Every structure is written in structure tokens, then in C-alpha cells.
Image: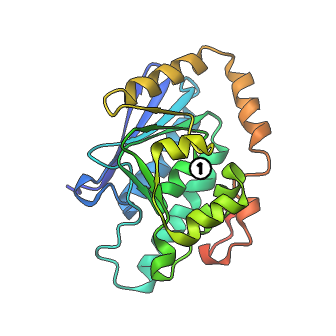
Amino acid sequence: MAEDRANFEKKGSIGIAWIENPNKGNALSSNVLGDLLGILDFMERDKNLLFLILSSRGKHFCTGFDIAGIEDTEAIRERISLFAHLLPRIERLRVPVLATVKGAAYGGGFELALACDLIIASEKASFAFPEPAIGGCPLFGAVRLPQLIGRPRAKEIMMTCRRVAAHEALAIGLLNKVVSDEALMDSAIALADDIVQKGPVAIGMIKLAMNQKLGGPDLAYLKGYELNIQAC
């Protein structure tokens, strides 16, 4: 049985997706990415689910791509394709998505959090894009991060590859809240409970209105994703 999976549970009208690849810092393998896409399919079908929390088991939220075992270009292309489908689908999902970040949210893990509508982080969380240090470019992050915190600050964070601690991330508008490790999931559930008590149609319209220019078409020019994101 594969150890790298994403599992799902329901708490009333709230769904919780758990990234489970703790031996590799919850890195994004093809299994994890495929499971997350399947969870989004389930969320779309089950109209009783009104909110999704994206969380993780172990020390870290997500340290980026799991590159172990990738030895050929086609395997790399497949994993990038799965990831490129996942991010805009989170943005287009009919219900709000909240990321709970503890430990590291690096590279693809940072981008995964950016695709969510809300982010709550633990005091020990940190965010970074290390890719430029080894010649890579986090394309989704290069589009989304400046939309949240402004271009000058986003460029500095991405071009220097420095780590941004939780309280700085809160101060620059990246997060909704910073809490202790112990309070992270309880805080997420409390916020989700508050939101699902409101009119679900109204909440969906708010997300749609704010994300109307997001969710794929605005990313289609990014040739590095090697697929037409609008068709995903």
C-alpha cells in the first residue's frame, strides 16, 4: 500500500482533505495529486458539503514536489500536468477552501496554499519559493503572490528565495490568522463552521465574484505548464 496519499473525511457539512506523505515532508507525489483531484470531484458531487479544509499529517504542510523516482521527462510532465490541473480547480471549486499550514509550505506547497481562499497558519509555519536557487520558476506563485501582497514585496521574496515566517506573512496580508500548533485545526473548524452557517448560495457567489478572473484562463499563457489549463 502506498504511503503517499491524500485522505478525506467529513465533519457534517465540512470536508477535510489530509495530505499524507509525512516521511517526505508531505511532498506532492502523483498519488497525492491524483487523490486531491478526486477529492475535488467528490466535493463537487456532494451538495451537502459546503466547505473544504486542506490540511496535512506530520510536521509540515507541504515541502513541494516529491521528485524521488522521477527519472524521465514524461514522468515529470505527468506530475506537472496533475499539479497544473489541481490549482485552478481549487480556485473554481463551488465552496470555500481553507489551507491549514504548519511547518514548511515551500515551492509547490506554497502554491497550493495560494490557490486556497483562506489560510490559517501555526506560529511555526514558514513560506518560501526555493526554486530560483536551482534554476526553477514557480509559475503559479509568480502570478498569485503579487496579487495578494503587491509586486515589489512578492518579487523580493521570490527572487531571494528567503523564508517568510508566519507573523510576517500575516502582517503582509498573506494569511487570515496565526495560531498555535495545537489550535490550528480547531481554529480552522471554527472558521468553517461560522461560514457554513451563512447562505451557501451567497457564499458561493462571493467566491465566484472575487475569483471570476482566476481559475485557469489567466494562467493559460504560462507555457511551462505544458498544457491548456483552460481545458482542465
Q: Is residue 208 left or right of residue 83?
A: right
The one of 220 and 46 positioned closer to us in this rendering: 220
* Vertical comparison of 98 with 130: above or below: above
Please, which colouring scheme is shown? rainbow
Please report the residue visible at 53 percent of the width from the left and 26 percent of the height from the top. 49
Give SS at disc 1: helix
Count of numbered circles on the image? 1
Q: Residues within 10 Å of mark 1 (few under 14, many from 20)?
A: many
Is residue 230 among the parts visible in the rendering? no
The one of 6 and 26 positioned closer to us in this rendering: 26
Q: Quadrant of the N terminus?
A: bottom left
Q: Give coordinates of residue 100: x percent, y percent.
A: 44, 38
* Vertical comparison of 222 with 109: above or below: below
Is residue 122 among the parts visible in the rendering? yes
Q: Quadrant of residue 218?
A: bottom right
Please report the residue visible at 42 percent of the width from the left and 34 percent of the height from the top. 16
The one of 117 and 40 positioned closer to us in this rendering: 117
Residue denoted by label 1: 115
Q: Give coordinates of residue 121: x percent, y percent.
A: 45, 39
Please report the residue visible at 59 percent of the width from the left and 27 percent of the height from the top. 47
* Vertical comparison of 32 with 212: above or below: below
Q: Is residue 138 left or right of residue 55?
A: right
Q: Is residue 26 left or right of residue 193?
A: left
The extreme bottom residue here reads 72
Q: Give coordinates of residue 102: x percent, y percent.
A: 37, 43
Q: What's the amino acid at mark 1?
A: Ala
* Vertical comparison of 225 with 48: above or below: below
Q: Quadrant of the C terminus?
A: bottom right
Q: Give coordinates of residue 91: x percent, y percent.
A: 64, 47
Please report the residue visible at 35 percent of the width from the left and 73 percent of the height from the top. 67
Q: Quadrant of residue 75?
A: bottom left
